[in-house]
Amino acid sequence: MITGELKSRIDRIWDAFWSGGISNPLEVIEQITYLLFIKRLDDLHTLEERKAARTGKPMTRRIFPEGCDEQWRKYDDLRWSRFRSAEPKEMYETVGERVFPFLRTLGGDGSTYSDHMKDARFTIPNPALLSRVVDMLDGIPMEDRDTKGDLYEYMLSKIATAGHNGQFRTSRHIIQLMVEMTKPTPTDEICDPACGSAGFLVEAGEYVRDHHPDALHDAELREHFHKRMFHGFDFDGTMLRIGSMNMLLHGVEKPDIRYRDSLAESVSGESEKYSLILANPPFAGSLDYESTSKDLQRVVKTKKTELLFLALFLRLLKPGGRAAVIVPDGVLFGSTKAHKELRRILVEEQKLDGVVKLPSGTFKPYSGVSTAILLFTKTDSGGTDNVWFYEVTADGWSLDDKRTPLLSAEKLGPAPEVALTEDEHAKNNLPDALARWFRRDDDELQRARTEQSFCVPKANIVAQGYDLSLNRYKEVVHEETEHRPPLEILEDLERLESEIQQGMSDLKAMLR
C-alpha cells in the first residue's frame, strides 16, 4: 500500500502542475510518465555501466551514445543523473530541446513503451515547474517494484476526477474481483482489447506474482511472463504510453501494448490466440457497417459496439479460454435479433458460467449506467448447464458521485485482510461474491432464487428467450400485511370528523 507520505508527495507534484498552468489530469500524468521513463533509461544505462566495470568487458547495449552530438554537446548531458542538478533554465533547455527529440528517435529500452515515443510532446510551460517536479520525482524511492506500481496507480486514480477522462479507468476493486474469479496462471496469454491504462493486465500480473511466486524463478516461465503473457490494444496514443509505463513500473519488462482499432481491423491474425480476456471496453453506441471488421460481422451482424466487442472476445479466445468482461445491462435483455443471437451463442455454443450484476453507481461520477460482469468459457461445443447469478448491492464505496470508502482499507476489495461481519458485508459484497463463485457447482445449486445468489438451469434461460437479466429469475418475497376492514376505517373517520366538528363548535361558543 502506498504510504501517506508518498501520497502527499504526489499530491504536491499534482498541485505544482495545476499552479503551473496544466490542469488536464491526463496531460499531467503524461508529462510525469515521460520524466519517469527518462529516469528509467538512466537507471538502465547505469546498470550496464556497472556490469561492464565488473566484468571488464565493453557495454553490450548503450542507451545514451558515446561522445558528442553535431553541436559538440555531450550525450551524457541527456541523462537524468546529469541534468537533475543543473540550473532550472539550463535543465529546461536540455530537456525540451535535446532530451525529447532524442526520445522521439529512440529504439529505447526494448519495451513497447519506447515504440510509442515518436509523438512525445514536452508541454511543461516553464523552467521553475520542471525543476520542482524533477526534484520531487528524484526524492521518491523508485527501487522497489511495489512502490513504483502503487505510486503510478495512485496517479492514475486521479484521472477519474477529470470527467470524461474517467472512462479510461475501471475501479481497482472491480478489476481485482474479475481477476480473482478467473485465477490467471503462469502459462496464460492474457488480452485486453481496450486496455486504456492497462489496469486489468497489471492486476493479472500481480495475481500471478502473489499466487505463483515460483513461476518467475523458472527461466522459461519468466521469459513468458515478461514477453508473451500480456497483450493490450488501444487506439489512443496517450493511453498506450501510460498503459505501457504502468506495466513497466509493475515489473513487466516487454508487454505487448500496441495501437489497434479493435472493432475496425481484421482479427484473423489474432483469432483463437488468447487463453484469458479481461476487459471493460468503452461502449460508444453504434458504428457504420463499413468501418466494422468483417470478421466480427460474421459472428453477429450489428452496429452496436457492446455486441461487437463480445463477438471480438469470442474470436480472440482459444478453445478452453475464459473471459470476465463488463457489459451494459442492455446486453443482458436487449430484444433485437443481434442481442438474442449473441446470448444464444454464449448459452448454446459456448459455456456461460456466470452473471454478476453491479450497482448502478459503480462507475460514478462519470457514468451512472447499469452494468454486469459476464463470465464465460469458449468451448465451441456448448457446455452450459446452469448459469450462476449474483447481485452486488454494495461494493465497499458509496454509490454517489463522491465514491468514498464505507469501510477501513483492510476491509475493502474482494480479498480483504480481515473477515467481514454481517453488517460489514452489507457495505462490501465482493468477498461473499467471490466465495460463492467458487461454490457455484456445489451448494450454490441449492440456493433459493430469493437469495443474493442462485443458479438457473439452462432450460429456464432458453424458455425466457435467452434473457440474462437477474431480475427475470429472481423471486421477490412479499411480506403479508394485515389490513383493517374498510368499514372499520370509515367508522373511525366518521368519529374523528364528528370530534373535529364538536371541537369547532365549542371554540366558537368560547369566542362569543
Image: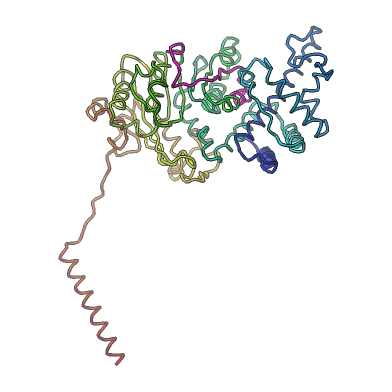
Which quadrant is the C terminus positioned in? bottom left
Q: Does 245 sit above or below residue 371?
A: above
Q: In the rendering, at what x and y percent does residue 269 appear?
A: 46, 11
Nearer-the-camera pick, 229 or 391: 229
Q: Position of residue 111 (x, y in %)?
A: 63, 17
Q: Is most of the magenta stretch helix, strand or loop?
A: loop
Q: Nearer the viewer, residue 41 or 385?
A: 41
Name the residue furthest top.
57
Position above or below: 511 against 243: below
In the rendered view, how is the structure colored?
rainbow
Reply yes or no: does residue 323 show up in magenta: no
The image quadrant that residue 373 belongs to is top left
Look at the image and say whether residue 252 sits in the magenta stretch.
yes
Q: Is any part of residue 260 visible from this angle?
A: yes
Residue at 57% over, 19% down = 213
Among the 4 quarters of the image, the one containing residue 40: top right
Q: Quadrant of the N terminus?
A: top right
Left or right: 485 in relation to 383? left
Name which quarter of the figure residue 427 lies in. Answer: top left
Where does the magenta region start and end?
Answer: 244-272
User: How many badges with numbers are in the image?
Assistant: 0
Place of residue 73 in the rendered image (x, y in percent of width and height, measured from the top left): 83, 20
Residue 268 x %, y %: 43, 12
Q: Is residue 434 visible?
A: no
Q: Residue at x 22, y 56 (%)?
A: 482
Q: Is residue 30 above or below residue 12?
A: above
In the visual, does 248 lie left or right of 419? right
Q: Nearer the viewer, residue 1 or 58?
A: 58
Quick one: which residue is furthest to the left in this view?
487
